[in-house]
Amino acid sequence: MSSDPAPIERPAASSPRAGLRNRVVTAVVCAAFDPATDEAILAVRERVREAGIALPDRPPHRPHFSLAAARVDREIDLARVCALVAELSTSHQPVPIALTEVGRFGRAGALWLGPAPNRGLPALQRAAYRALKQAGWPPAFGERSAPKLWVPHCTLATRVPKPLLRHVQATVAAGYDPIRGTVAGLATILVGGRGDVAYSALVA
């Protein structure tokens, strides 16, 4: 019988690279609506649920248009992103909008509300995109958020099964009345997170 002590199991040390990877988050700069518009959009979302699409009672984030996004270090860069967005909000006025379209992205199984054309919203998106890029953070979603390619949309649901997507779109559109409201502020959110990291009202 051996008298040697049993080996002690030690947890594997995490590498510095793994720790850094865990700190990297995707920060999204969003156009946020006034409270009445939020509630009207959430009411449309309920119609998606009633059409048989499984969705949580409330989405993890407020209704919004995603304007620009960047992969940043949570500890080093996130506060800088929020400060940049706060500064940006002081140079733009609230933007009146009309959500007139019930649209879809087939590949992503996404259903969304889209705005009628206006000048203020593209200008706001262009400013957010350029501000992040000029600060040294390349676009997190590639060129989809480049101003010439950007499609403004407020997501109602994602991963809707493709056989159902057209049906749900038609069902929602059949009873849909355009929502008129205002882009009232800029919110910073994290992909995979919940709620705002920061919010700044448009005050110019």
Image (cartoon, helix red, strand yellow):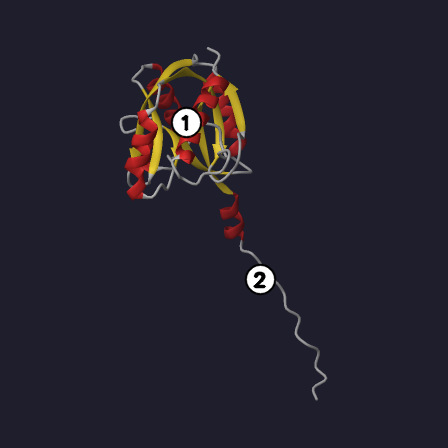
Report crowding for label 2: few under 14, some 14 to 19, many 20 or more residues within 10 A (C-alpha).
few
- Please name which of the two marks, 2 or 1, marks the residue nearer to the observer: 1
Q: Which residue is mark 1?
A: 44
Q: Earlier in the sequence, mark 2 or mark 1?
A: 2
**Disc 1 on helix, strand or loop?**
helix
**Disc 2 on helix, strand or loop?**
loop
Q: Residue furthest right?
A: 3
* Picture residue at 43% right of the left edge, 24% below the top: 41
* Picture residue at 35% right of the left edge, 18% below the top: 178
- Residue 32 located left or right of residue 106: right
Position of residue 13 measured from the top left corner of the image (x, y, whole percent): 58, 59
Position of residue 36 measured from the top left corner of the image (x, y, whole percent): 48, 18
Position of residue 161 measured from the top left corner of the image (x, y, whole percent): 33, 44
* Picture residue at 54% right of the left edge, 49% below the top: 19
Report crowding for label 1: few under 14, some 14 to 19, many 20 or more residues within 10 A (C-alpha).
many
Residue type for callout 2: Ala
**Looking at the picture, does residue 190 appear above or below residue 98?**
below
Q: Which mark is residue 12?
A: 2
- Residue 8 located left or right of residue 18: right
Q: Is residue 171 among what the camera can see? A: yes
| Foreground pick, 182 / 129 | 182
Residue type for callout 1: Val
Q: Does the residue at mark 2 contact the one at mark 1 (Cβ under 8 Å)?
A: no
- Residue 169 located left or right of residue 199: left
Q: Which picture quadrant has residue 118?
A: top left
Q: Quadrant of the N terminus?
A: bottom right
| Foreground pick, 145 / 171 | 171
Q: Is residue 151 among what the camera can see? A: no
Q: Which picture quadrant has residue 129?
A: top left
